Amino acid sequence: MHFSIIIPVFNRPEELEELLFSLSRLEYDKQYEVVIVEDGSTLMSDTICSKFKADINISYHYKENSGPGDSRNFGMKVAKGNYFIIFDSDCLIPPHYLKEVEKELELNYVDCFGGSDAAHASFTDIQKAINFAMTSFLTTGGIRGGSEKISKFQPRSFNMGISKKAFEATDGFGNIHPGEDPDLSMRLWKLGFTTRLFPKAFVFHKRRIDWEKFSIQVNKFGKARPILDSWYPEYSKLTFFFPTIFVVGFVFSLIMTLFSINIFLALYSLYFILILVLSTFQSRSLTIGILSVYAVINQFWGYGTGFLKSFVKIRILKQQPEKAFPELFFKFKS
């Protein structure tokens, strides 16, 4: 098996340098390649890539900007391997990663897998808080993970693998973003391919974003889900409504306090205390615990309101997704 690691990058040379440094420390003695796809950046990464050519079998490709999904497709088209592994540029890769992937594929082969993410010790407190919000079983990360079977997992494109066979059968990622990764998973399922979670093949996902960017990101996640549900109704689940129900319920609980009915707000307060305690315990930092509460509020509000807006436009008013939310769609150029 010959792995090709595909990494799209857009205006983040310093970030890519950290990722390539972590790849240069991989404990894997078999042949593999790293394919860098510069997606129309003005801050180029070619010099950074040249620094690692002595340690990594690396190739660098520049193309016009057409989005991360199309850039990953471009990388898989020029790659030489027969199994592609895809990372976002804001990831750090543990030394054991490829060994774990190879072990899982030899044990129970699948044509597409996904791995999880973790917070590295070097991350900022905000990055660790956002990571908690995106991965904890108490948040939407837990809702997604709990609603997906390990043997029918929807890989996320910051850490996923796909065989050349599966890529050629599907033509890779579509032009929706975000949402291009679950879209690909469901198209794979319809073609008879299987997906699976590789629990030990994790990466450290930095998510270099501030609070405003995080809110925008999760809002887009929420907007994308009803679109995907309209395309693949057979894979729609009630759990996708939970964040919106959470937001509506929170507004309702605030209204009820005007009538001296405090039980609903008390339940929400209990939930936020659980977030505070769990995050503080896991991180051993009260600061991160407090920031995690804020991150979870941002996550639920952003996703829940985005989902509600999209559900009304797509599922009720039957608007065309590309016209209703043009910001979610890239025009392919490659």
Image (spheres, helix red, strand yellow):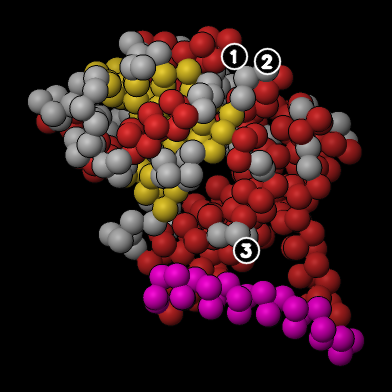
Circle 2 is placed at which residue position? 191
Tell me the chief SS of the magenta region.
Answer: helix
Q: Amino acid at mark 1?
A: Thr
Residue 237 spot, x, y in % from top left: 78, 42
Sequence order check, earlier mark of 1 and 3: 3
Residue 134 spot, x, y in % from top left: 54, 54
Q: Residue at x 38, y 67 (%)?
A: 125
Q: Amino acid at mark 3?
A: Leu
For residue 167, side relative to residue 31 (left or right):
right
* Mark 1 residue crowding within 10 angstroms, few (<14) / some (14–19) / many (20+): some
Circle 1 is placed at which residue position? 170
Q: Residue at x 70, y 39 (%)?
A: 225
Q: Is residue 265 above or below residue 83?
A: below
Q: Quadrant of residue 75?
A: top left
Helix or strand or loop: what does disc 1 sit on?
helix
Helix or strand or loop: what does disc 3 sit on?
loop
Q: Residue furthest front?
A: 107
Q: Which quadrant holds the N terminus? A: top left
